[in-house]
Image (cartoon, coloured by chain):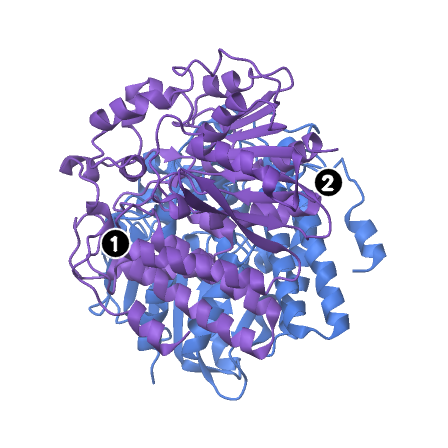
Chain colours: A blue, B purple
Amino acid sequence: MSKNLSEVLFSEKNNVRETSSLIANSGSKKHQRQHQSTLDGQQSVGWYRLLKLLQWSWQGIDIIDCYEVLAKISASTNPRTDSNLLDTVIGFRSGNWSYEWSKKAMTYQKQANQYSQDGDTQQAQQHYYLASQLYSVASYPHLKGDENSIQAQTLAVTNYRQSFMHNRHALLKEIQVPFQGKQVTTFLHLPNDDVIHPVVIVSAGIDTLQCDFLPLFERYLKPAGIAMLTVDMPGVGFSNHLKLTQDTSLLHQAVLQHVADIPWVDQSRVALMGMRMGANALNRLAYVEPHRAKAVVSVGAAVASVFDDINRFKQLPVMTLDCLASRMQLQKSDASYLYQHCVPFSLIKQGLLGRKKVKTPCLSIGHSDDLMCSEQDLKLMARISYESEAKIIDKSPIFDSYLITLQYSAQWLAKHLQE
Amino acid sequence: MSKNLSEVLFSEKNNVRETSSLIANSGSKKHQRQHQSTLDGQQSVGWYRLLKLLQWSWQGIDIIDCYEVLAKISASTNPRTDSNLLDTVIGFRSGNWSYEWSKKAMTYQKQANQYSQDGDTQQAQQHYYLASQLYSVASYPHLKGDENSIQAQTLAVTNYRQSFMHNRHALLKEIQVPFQGKQVTTFLHLPNDDVIHPVVIVSAGIDTLQCDFLPLFERYLKPAGIAMLTVDMPGVGFSNHLKLTQDTSLLHQAVLQHVADIPWVDQSRVALMGMRMGANALNRLAYVEPHRAKAVVSVGAAVASVFDDINRFKQLPVMTLDCLASRMQLQKSDASYLYQHCVPFSLIKQGLLGRKKVKTPCLSIGHSDDLMCSEQDLKLMARISYESEAKIIDKSPIFDSYLITLQYSAQWLAKHLQE
């Protein structure tokens, strides 16, 4: 890391807007003591953000690093937007969420540079990867207009690319997908470029970046010879300029159609895998493009009940509401107001879920106690076609359920992508 | 790993008693749907054991490995002691807790052997360490008479030793402490043996092994030049033959007195650090041996309220009750019955906590919502001496609070152990 960038990155900025203040919300809401565990991680009293420790750990981040950063944020005496919420320190300086995570990320980036210079490619790859993941958390939850977040996002992507430049066992290709007069960057992860691979298009929740899912590829898809094409949801990352609308699958449809132009993958063997709102988009896509996708996996899909029942919707964590508002380019996230704009996301109301049938096999996975995706939703998704199935988990922690089932999902995908 | 050991280890045994059936309990209790989050990790519906994913991740275990093992256990169709509890598959075979974790551990052990043969000491060290940690989870919660557990414990220790044989940056010495006519093995972790080090005696809960705390040493104590001496609680690990009684500090007192005979540490600079029941023992020790310990740190100490109030006690997870019964060599863990035996553990009832004063500074850390350790307990512990302090966390998840504060604890210890 050049001294220059370090200086630029860590110059104190106190005039930027603090993340939790970007979306207007009723003051009382931000204080709500919610103990609701969701698939997205535990909501903790005293924090604006959902602390996704298990997810971050799954991504490869050292949990001890997480605790050290959280301890620094907790202990800061700098002014906060809301003194009851630890992660709302104002300005890019000590105690601020983006600042502290970026600082930790930079230590890995520096080590990576050193390893790279020393010719230790394996360590360089690993350290660039870890830097990218820490920068991604620094950016989290990636709200539009969050200056600190945007800076961290850029570094997350740079380090992710660097990591692959040192990777001898997999390739990263950046695929520019033409969409609405612009190009949207997607990441194609390839086991190698010797042969043509089947491919899975992956999108997750609206609070994730596309660089957050490498273990899915490394552990499960690559060993099965499957490529992974990740797409940022509208309003996030490379799709930051796009607005999330009820036609959630618009961008993904363009990506799916573009697959025919990608030389390394087999356009006749394309599957879809989505989580949360990503599963909304990809489920919808399965209805809209019934002949292009060979299979679809939905994990904890936000497809119906959460948009059909205001009481469910109102229980969503404040951060999640802010994310929804941000992606939809709305200025406030008051639940009653936001709900009116989200009702059309229901694939039941759109006349698809439970109404229309296609031939694409669908695996829908979720937890019976999940706020975002009810048991009924899971069953409806499995009715899309005759070969479909619902995997409903009622034991084990809610969050874990989807990580526990990834291996199963990958095997299911591999089966459906066989020639 | 020799083929022989592999065969011995993985021969199916269906006649051993399954862990959850070792301690008699009312059937209804095992089904109790408790959602109580404790400092010890989340209790999950459908599991007998507390799933301490964050703790295991902190120990260095790959969370993806955890999910893979839990998925295998979940999916098993072999008979269970209780069909509602996933981790109660009977016999040492596919789906059984100890079997699946041991299998994962063995893959690391084999890799470690290979690295060792190839002369890659760093990788060998790391892989032996990970094997030890996975074997420790295989043994968890280490109930007396659990045959599968005992086998896994032995392997945890063997691999822990092997890891240190490949460690160039720290030393492990096994210290035999004479106690009640026998020897109890404790582990002394040393930054080096060039100089004499101050030392911290560490004991944690009754569901942990002494090999579960290496990051505390590696990350926080070693950099401060402090040695760590770990002691298994009575009834667990190397102290398996001992009975936990109201005089909880008896064994630790013998250890503390024995420090004078250990050549690598400075007997005038000894501190104590305990968690849960370990903190009961070490707090008690601070009262009993006021001149030998320079400082004591208690984390989420089970010292009073949980033993003074049957309603608190009854809310403890079944697994925790079973552990208590096992350490006390009682045959059943029915809460009302067990409570009568646990009442004397209260250091208030023993006339110590809040009654007696000594000069030893005490740092007591905990969460205001913790079942095992109330805010009042924390305040009482801080009254042991004038230099003491209570650190009461009310934000952040309960469990995280103690990992978040380890760095602070270590700094506090280093300050008090200065010459």
Q: Characterize the local packing of mark 1: few (<14), some (14-19) or many (20 or more) Cα atoms within 10 angstroms.
A: some
The picture places residue A389, in percent across and down from the top left corner, at 23, 63
Foreground pick, A224 / B84:
B84
Which residue is farthest top? B355
Foreground pick, B385 / B313:
B385
> Can residue B132 be seen?
yes
Element type at marker 1?
Answer: strand
The image quadrant that residue B293 belongs to is top right
- Mark 2 or mark 1, which is nearer the start of the sequence? 2
The Cα–Cα distance between marks 1 and 2, rounded to whole angstroms, is: 43 Å
Q: Give the residue type that dot 1 points to.
A: Ile
The image quadrant that residue A351 belongs to is bottom left
Q: Give the residue type that dot 2 points to.
A: Phe
Q: Which residue is mark 1?
A: A392
Q: Characterize the local packing of mark 2: few (<14), some (14-19) or many (20 or more) Cα atoms within 10 angstroms.
A: many
In the rendered view of the protein, which quadrant contains the N terminus of chain A?
A: bottom right
Q: Which residue is mark 2?
A: A92
Point 49% across, 58% down: residue: B160
Task: Name above or below for residue A206 compared with residue B400.
Answer: below
The picture places residue B133, in percent across and down from the top left corner, at 45, 56
In the rendered view of the protein, which quadrant contains the C terminus of chain A?
A: bottom left
Are discs 1 and 2 located on one and the same chain? yes
> Can residue A145 be seen?
no
Point 30% across, 34% down: residue: B328
Element type at marker 2?
Answer: loop
Chain letter of the residue carrying label 1: A
Point 60% across, 16% down: residue: B385
